[in-house]
Image (cartoon, grey):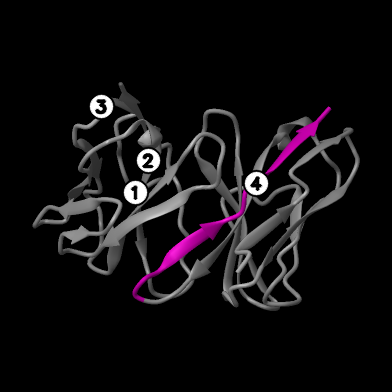
Amino acid sequence: DAKTTQPPSMDCAEGRAANLPCNHSTISGNEYVYWYRQIHSQGPQYIIHGLKNNETNEMASLIITEDRKSSTLILPHATLRDTAVYYCIVRSNSGNTPLVFGKGTRLSVIA
Amino acid sequence: NAGVTQTPKFRILKIGQSMTLQCTQDMNHNYMYWYRQDPGMGLKLIYYSVGAGITDKGEVPNGYNVSRSTTEDFPLRLELAAPSQTSVYFCASLREGRSEKLFFGSGTQLSVL
């Protein structure tokens, strides 16, 4: 079973920030939060990951709450090309634990 | 680097036929994975490998076999194709370390009729 809970779908206006929430209330101390997205029928694409500090890269920002039980992926200026399914995954990066994908959030960016 | 390459891109099988989905990566990654994705659903892990000669089952391994004789190649075999195996199959490899990241192939769309 997936360790995360995400809303099934969200809409966002083009040019606005898209804030995608993820609940992971049973996260362990050595587990990271990963975000991937899948555009149409392509293979998933890595976005960002973090342990407890907020992270930012050229694609997005990841905000993790202090208790680490939830996080938010922020796309600062959403474009139509950001329309995709976004997956939040919790995983330990030690050993050979594979990434297990849930159903994700379908983000629709609207012009 | 070509990244992760999957062949074929499309395939139609008859019930009971067998086939091998090919996956190769040129990034010298130890970890490789096979996922399937049914329409409108998320990805399900079939098998994975942590290095040449080592494989392990994922969430949905029944009806599939894998081998990992080299670091580069991780083929997935369907022995007796069934309609329930109609799906899109994705292969992936993992770059380890602080900038850990999964790289996916472009997928194989398989229909079993």
Residue at horizontal 56 percent and vertical 36 percent from the top: A41
Q: Identify the mark nearer the N-term, 1 or 3.
A: 1
Quadrant in the picture for the C terminus of chain B: top right
Have a look at marks 2 and 4 and say if they share a chain: no
Q: Measure the C-alpha gap from mark 1 to mark 2.
A: 15 Å
Q: Quadrant of residue B83?
A: top right
Circle nearer the viewer, 4 or 3:
3
Mark 1 chain: A
Three-letter amino acid code at the position of disc 3:
Cys
Q: In x, y percent, where is residue B86?
A: 72, 34
Q: In this view, does B48 lie to the left or right of A98?
A: right
Residue highlighted by disc 3 = A12
Residue highlighted by disc 2 = A86
Which element is circle 4 on? Answer: loop
Residue A105 in view of the camera? no
Q: In the rendered structure, which segment of residues is drawn in magenta?
A: B98-113
Three-letter amino acid code at the position of disc 2:
Tyr
Residue at horizontal 45 percent and vertical 47 percent from the top: A101
Three-letter amino acid code at the position of disc 4:
Gly
Q: In x, y percent, where is residue A18?
A: 23, 36
Instruction: Check whether the beta carbons of the residues at disc 4 and disc 1 lie within 8 A of each other.
Output: no
Which element is circle 1 on? Answer: loop
Task: State the residue lying farthest toward the top.
Answer: A111
